[in-house]
Amino acid sequence: MKNIVRLVIFFSCAFILVLFFFTLIDFFRVRRLELTTITLSGPFLREFVFSFCGLLPQTLYLTILISLSYAARREISSPASMVCVFVLAMGFIALGWPLISKANHIRLPPASGKTITFGGKGLVLFPDNESDGAMTLLDGPREYPRVVVFPGARAEYQRTRDEGNFEPSVTPPAKPLFFRNDANAFMSKLMDKFHLVALKFETLAARGLMDFMLYAAALILPLVSLRFIMNASSWHLANLLLGGVFFSGVLYFETFIDSTQAQNLISTAIKGIIPRNYISPLVFCLAFVLFISAAILLHALSKRRQKNGGGYA
């Protein structure tokens, strides 16, 4: 019982801290990109609170992962830890529903007439086919507000005023350049998946509490069922990393099942017997049953191996 209380405290603190950390990271990212003008006022504080909605999926995934790892370190039984984490996750999801259901109606305050410029001064774009090449965007005179510098070529002005009278002095490169993003591809795709899940949460929350909680419960089930991964080895850090890989797989599986193509395919296969709103929860529950079955099978094999080893001794 004492370990269960510790798990409750750990999950609650981890959820709040992870959510606050992600919110700060997102806030400073927006400030760095200067996407809008934000002032410390009532609207700003309101938007800061409502920004939690878009960060709830990654918070939920990470909190469940580290909580299951904590339960494994404390040697809390798998069924007890799974039930405890499931109830706690559902509780925090239910508390966040009033905010998420209103997320579609909340928008950032106006930028006070500030013009948003994408691709400003100092932006460097790297081509895929040339590791040492780049295109740099710099400031130019008023008539030519942007200067484009291609590798091995003269600077080229880009004009945005009086386009009809503009005659380029420098011929652009005949061969098009394909540019890459230096950001980590895996993390970028991971964040894109979490963004899709956040949109799904907002859509379901706007429909009502029942659809939202049903989807959340069905999603949490396969996550907590991966508790057996945390006992794969005696090294807890390795188990945590392995659990992160499986959790990433669940995330990709979730976004695939939620996609329109997968929904249409499943709906056609079952001939519309189940409403489309319940297709994803049903698939998540089937994944839960599959994971639990795998856990029971592995546990039985482990017990049998220990019994055989004891007999030989």
Image: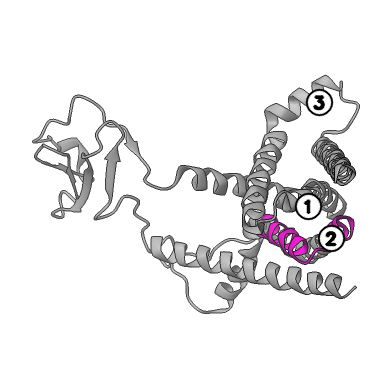
Q: Is residue 21 or residue 38 the one in the foreground?
A: 21
Three-letter amino acid code at the position of disc 2: Ser
Q: Indicate the secondary structure of the residue bearing disc 2.
A: helix
Whether the magenta-drawn stretch holds residue 71 is answered as yes
Callout 2 environment at 10 Å: few (<14), some (14 to 19), or many (20+)? many
Question: Under tag 3, what secondary structure?
Answer: helix
Q: Evaluate whether residue 144 shows in this view.
A: yes
Under mark 1, the amino acid is Arg
Q: Cα distance, mark 2 to mark 3?
A: 35 Å
**Circles 1 and 2: CB atoms closer than 8 Å:** yes
Q: Which mark is residue 46?
A: none
Sequence order check, earlier mark of 1 and 2 = 2
Q: Is residue 243 left or right of residue 42?
A: right
Corner quadrant of residue 47: bottom right
Q: Disc 1 versus disc 3: distance between alpha carbons?
A: 31 Å
Marks 1 & 3, CB-CB < 8 Å contact: no
Q: In this view of the protein, which residue sits in the foreground, 11 or 308? A: 308
Image position, residue 282 (x, y; %): 85, 37
Marks 1 and 2, Cα distance to the nearest angstrom?
8 Å
In front of the other: label 2 or label 3? 2
Q: Which residue is mark 3?
A: 267
Give the x, y percent position of residue 110: 49, 64
Q: Amino acid at mark 3?
A: Ser
Name the dominant secondary structure of the magenta segment: helix
Q: Which mark is residue 81?
A: 2
- Please state the horizontal and vertical placement of residue 76, each as a whole percent of the image: 83, 63
SS for dot 1: helix
Q: Which residue is mark 1?
A: 227
- Which region shows up in magenta? 59-83
The answer to whether residue 113 is visible is no
The image quadrant that residue 180 belongs to is: top left
Q: Quadrant of the N terminus?
A: bottom right
